[in-house]
Image: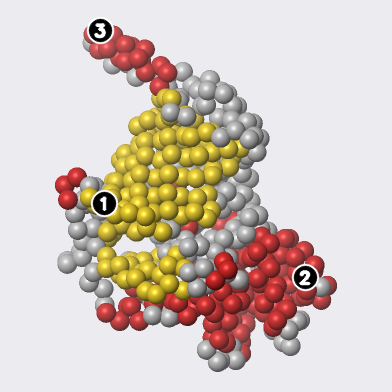
Amino acid sequence: MARTAVRSSRKRSSLLFLVLLAGAQGQTVIPTLPPLSASVAAKPIGDSIFPALGQAGLDVLNYDLDLTVDRPGTSELRGTVVLTVTSTQPLPVLSLDFLGPQVMEVRWNGLPAPYRHDQVVGKLTIEPPQPLLPGMRAEVTVRFAGQVGVRPDPYLPINVGWQAVPAVGERVGANFTLSEPDGTRTFLPVNDHPSDPATFTTRITVPAGYTAAASGVQLSEVAAPNGGRTFTFEQVQPIPTYTLAIHVNRFERVDSAAVPVGKGGADVIRRDYFPVGIPAGTRDAYVSTGEILKVLADWFGPYPFSAYGSAIVTPRVPALETATLSTMPVTSSNVRVVVHEAAHQWFGNRVTLADWSGVWLNEGFATYAELLWAQAQGETGDDMVRGWYARAGRNQTRPLVATTESQLFDTTSYIRGALALQAVRVTVDDAAFKAYLRGWVSEFQNRPVTTADLLTYTRTTLGARAEAALRLWAESPELPPLPEK
Ligand code: TRP
Ligand code: ZN
């Protein structure tokens, strides 16, 4: 029972009565509450790497977030989340991933609803008045406050999710999200799986002197109590939960000229956030962002969101492709990483994973974009490909589909993944390869993808020879020979 709170708001008044009665008799009674009346256990999505994540049949359409950071640099967070949900099968209970702060209140379409929050397992189970049936929509409100949850990264020596950066010297305390693969559940109740992307409205209230930033387009900045500010952002295209960016820091926001690489040549808003006091040279890497978007949009098709830029962070962590606003450490501020994270906006953030075992479909494509950028700068790229091959040969290799957590972000996902795309490319000319990359994005942007999807797509668009090349790179236990024209 440690840290497991069981509450039933329907029973709240009788519970209060019991506690008062026990107090009157001088006894300490730990109230045992009736369990949720629905006894049906919620079924997780069934991810092959993370079998407990998410709920099968749940489709979250929108998250409306109202967050307050009272003390930046700490793990304290409070807020209210309104989820707009529907389902693809009857759901007698809603089961959200949530390791985060203590739940204060849950409402279902505005009315108090019974719930159980297990902060150890990381599930918030909510009982609706009637099962959620396919085609029905509901608004589920969760209010919470306290310390965020902790989720060690499956691969790196960091905790994923809500990051707290304590004040050092001149620098103020800060917070930001770094959530791949399943860290968003450390601070928000979510269906924490990339196969259920959703839209977000994010409102963040911060103390005086702070700036908040988040995925999407800023709608407003208004005064809040005690000199604080409330910033509101809207992300109107669906994104996976792990790609949600939220930053609280003393920032300088730099707006640059919009880039006409959206759908039908629409303008993409350009803004970057630089923490006050970082080395001046850090900014150099971001001057090329607009040009990078142009080169990538030429290969991949229109940029899929309304804005793009970077928010720079000071801890030594890996860069992350947070949607519309990549999270870029000072120490990774170089053009190659900017290209890599920008490419993820198409591969990972717009075209999303059906299962984490297919993460090479994110990392292989983003790594391949580094080659496309180098070639757009007039290089042949031969050195890069040979370098990849040497590196893949020095490390343990495996088929592209990952089978364990620790494989997710290994050399195979990045480098062998990129080489697999090079193996496809050498079977056709560049015009066909470009059409292939663009078609993959346009055809699969609303349908989470697997390696099997890419194999089928490769055969139907480029033919049997291209598919055979990809299959060899996808499935061979050994490293296949260096692909050459
Ligand atoms: N997807 C990131 C990239 O290659 C790498 C990454 C994996 C990561 N897990 C992470 C970054 C956790 C930060 C935190 O761009
Ligand atoms: Zn990557």
Depth-wise, is mark 1 or mark 3 nearer the camera? 1
Displayed quadrant of residue 65: top left
Q: Earlier in the sequence, mark 1 or mark 3?
A: 3
Dot 2 amino acid type: Thr
Q: Is residue 308 left or right of residue 443?
A: left
Crowd tier of the residue under label 3, counting other residues whose Cα lies within 10 Å: few below 14, some 14–19, many 20 or above: few
Q: Which residue is mark 1?
A: 222
Residue drawn at 27 percent across, 68 percent down:
252
Residue at left offset 50%, top offset 45% = 62
In the rendered view, how is the structure colored?
A: secondary structure
Q: Quick one: label 1 or label 2, which is nearer the N terminus? A: 1
Label 3: state its secondary structure.
loop
* Mark 2 lies on residue: 461
Mark number displayed over residue 25: 3
Q: Give, as a three-letter code, the residue at label 3.
A: Gln
Q: How far is the residue under mark 2 from the one under mark 3?
A: 78 Å
The residue mark sitting in front, 1 or 2, is 1
Q: Are marks 1 and 3 in contact (CB under 8 Å)?
A: no
Residue 99: which quarter of the image?
Answer: top left
Question: Quadrant of the image for the C terminus?
Answer: bottom right
Q: Work out whether 313 lies above or below 99.
A: below
Q: Nearer the viewer, mark 2 or mark 3?
A: 2
Inter-mark Cα distance, 1 to 2? 50 Å
Going from N to C along the chain, the mark reached first, 2 or 3, is 3
